[in-house]
Image (tube, rainbow, N blue to C red):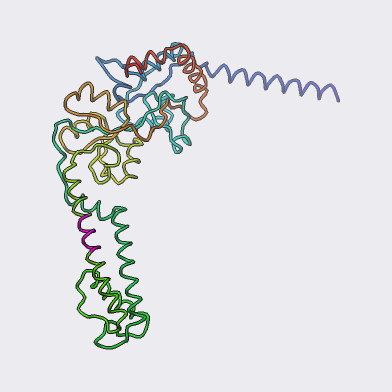
Amino acid sequence: MSARSIFDRFALAIVVVLMTASSAAAQPPISARELRVAVMPIPPLVMQENGSLTGFNIDLWNAIAARLQLKTDYQVLPDIASLLESMRTKNTDVVVSPIVITAARDQEFDFSLPTMQAGFQIMVRDTGEAAAPDPLADLLILLFSRTTALWIGIAAVLVLVPAHLVWLLEPRSEEGIVVSPKYIPGIFEAMYWAVCCLTTQAETMPHQWVVRTFSVFWMFAGVIFVSFYTAQLTTTLAFRQIRGAISGPEELPGRRIGTVANSTAVDYLRAHQARVQEFQTTDQMFQALLDKRVDAVVLGAPVLLYYATHEGRGRVKVVGPEFDVAPVAFTFQLESPLRKEVNGALLSLRENGTYQQLYDKWFGGS
């Protein structure tokens, strides 16, 4: 290898080292930058009081920032959509307000270790009165319920079995039950007779003695079927009217349920056939409940429990168990170097008891 070739390679190595060093110098360490931290007020996790921010998530982030010697520039945004959009446009380094970790969000953002596990709960008015009944909604819910589907299946069997028996055995005639010798439309003629027989409204009786005997028993079966179905329908509708207020997640379908827009509660409620009304803030949601514009609200348990024991004491109550529990966390830009440092600090706060102290401060000791 010539001396000139060795010199060229040495010079190239020096250039690469200098460029790397220059790039590193141009990018200040995390602790030297003022981080843009976005929050949305959602008591007791993030609250604005007298122009300053407080709450469990704020206290937790401040403890992490102090440990990592980070400077924080808080940006207060109005709703979840604004928080996520600020991350997409890279106007925010981290979102401290609780964001539920989902598969879709994990494709867009990075998340810290969970700051807590939180499920949904239901809150209703605490007035001692039942929710205003909605007979049309109750009827529609019942008509499209699994119970009704089962009854329809039973009715189909009670129609198809005698219809085929009549079609096979009954002689064809203009005055008879089945006129056409072909399966179609002959089977439909037989099915029409079977439906009339099931409701004890059959005008024509079979000529063939086996079918005639069978039809008598089938009419009795029809009387029993109609009686049971009518009793089921009446009992279910009466129960929904008497029950009134919602007491658990199984009673959400068909009810007017309020929640915060763009929250994961929206997806849950829609999947369970609730009549969802979305609000931009928790204050709007709570006011809608008090104004009777919704039958109940569904959101994270810590948020509802805090409101029920503070501003809403005596006016609202939390009912039913916590459900659909999921992790919530701080949100970062994809591949953010900040995430690893924050996770390390969060683990340290859990180990030294600081996290538990903050949790007990805001939610009470477990």
Name above or below for residue 197 compared with residue 30.
below
Q: How many marks?
A: 0
Q: Residue furthest right?
A: 1
User: Residue at 19% of width from left, 23% of height from top?
Assistant: 313
Horizontal and vertical percent position of residue 333: 47, 28
The quadrant of the rendering that contains the C terminus is top left
Horizontal and vertical percent position of residue 116: 40, 24
| Magenta stretch: helix, strand or loop mostly | helix
Closest to the observer, 359 or 250: 250
- Which of the 4 image quarters holds residue 77? top left
Name above or below for residue 311 compared with residue 227.
above
Q: Residue furthest bottom?
A: 173
Horizontal and vertical percent position of residue 96: 39, 23
Name above or below for residue 180 compared with residue 153.
below
Name above or below for residue 257 compared with residue 92.
below
Report the magenta residues as a range.
224-231
- Which of the 4 image quarters holds residue 35? top left
Whether residue 143 appears in magenta in the rendering, the answer is no
Horizontal and vertical percent position of residue 293: 17, 38
Closest to the observer, 7 or 327: 327
The quadrant of the rendering that contains the N terminus is top right
User: Residue at 32% of width from left, 19% of height from top?
Assistant: 363
User: Residue at 37% of width from left, 20% of height from top?
Assistant: 57
Closest to the observer, 7 or 245: 245
Closest to the observer, 196 or 260: 196
